[in-house]
Image: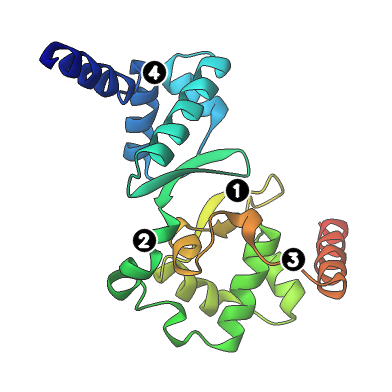
Amino acid sequence: MDRKRQASGAAVQQSSLLSTEARLVEVILFLENEPVSLERLSKMTSLTEEETRNALTEMQEHYRDYLHGMDLVESQGAFQFLPSSDLHDKLRSCYGKRVDRRLSRAAMETLSIIAYSQPITRREIDNIRGVSSDTIIRLLRDREYIKVVGRKDVPGHPCLYGTSRKFLFEFNLASISALPKLSDIDRLRFEQERVEEKEEA
């Protein structure tokens, strides 16, 4: 009887272990501390994209089934760890005290524009708002709600801004795709301003 229990326990323990490929992907996501695309993960691990995708799927199932403190989330083709949604309320007393820390209406407007239009340049933000956004962008970067995600391939190569992991957590979003849908009026406004910006460039 004891042998049967030991064998059963060993089988459960074995099934709870991640494969070497999944562990490798896991530690890279931990060390990178920002969303990483499937293609980049594949190059960094020397795994094929199919092997990398299988490792990610294994991790997602493992983190879900064994109730870890984090979830592996995919957003816009990139993967990252985020706090499990059921822990948000418990964490908010420690990490959520600065949620909008009384962000002004202008700052919230700018943050919304970046969230819905990312990646986006400062000039594109200015065109949508109709005023300069330099000070507000510095504020949002200082509070780590936004970050530089690249450079636009136009003369001058201006910075492209996007939202951060902190933005997702403090606004209780699993990913950017979880943002509330824009009204038709706002969507058309954003699209029109982006078109005008491209024409001017």
Along the horizontal axis of the image, is 25 left or right of 157? left
User: Label 1: which residue?
Assistant: 151
Residue at x 45% of width, y 62% of height:
169
Q: Quadrant of residue 28?
A: top left
Residue at x 54% of width, y 24% of height:
53
Q: Is residue 24 above or below residue 150?
A: above
User: Label 4: which residue?
Assistant: 21
What's the distance in space between the residues labelled 3 and 4, CA to CA? 37 Å
Viewer-nearest of discs 2 and 1: 2
User: Label 3: which residue?
Assistant: 181
Instruction: Work out whether residue 115 or residue 57 is closer to the camera in this orientation and state it.
Output: 57
Say few, some or many: other residues with alpha carbon within 10 Å of mark 1 (under 14 / 14 to 19 / 20 or more): some
Residue at x 53% of width, y 88% of height:
104
User: Label 2: which residue?
Assistant: 87
Q: Position of residue 77 (x, y in %)?
A: 61, 38
Residue at x 70% of width, y 74% of height:
126
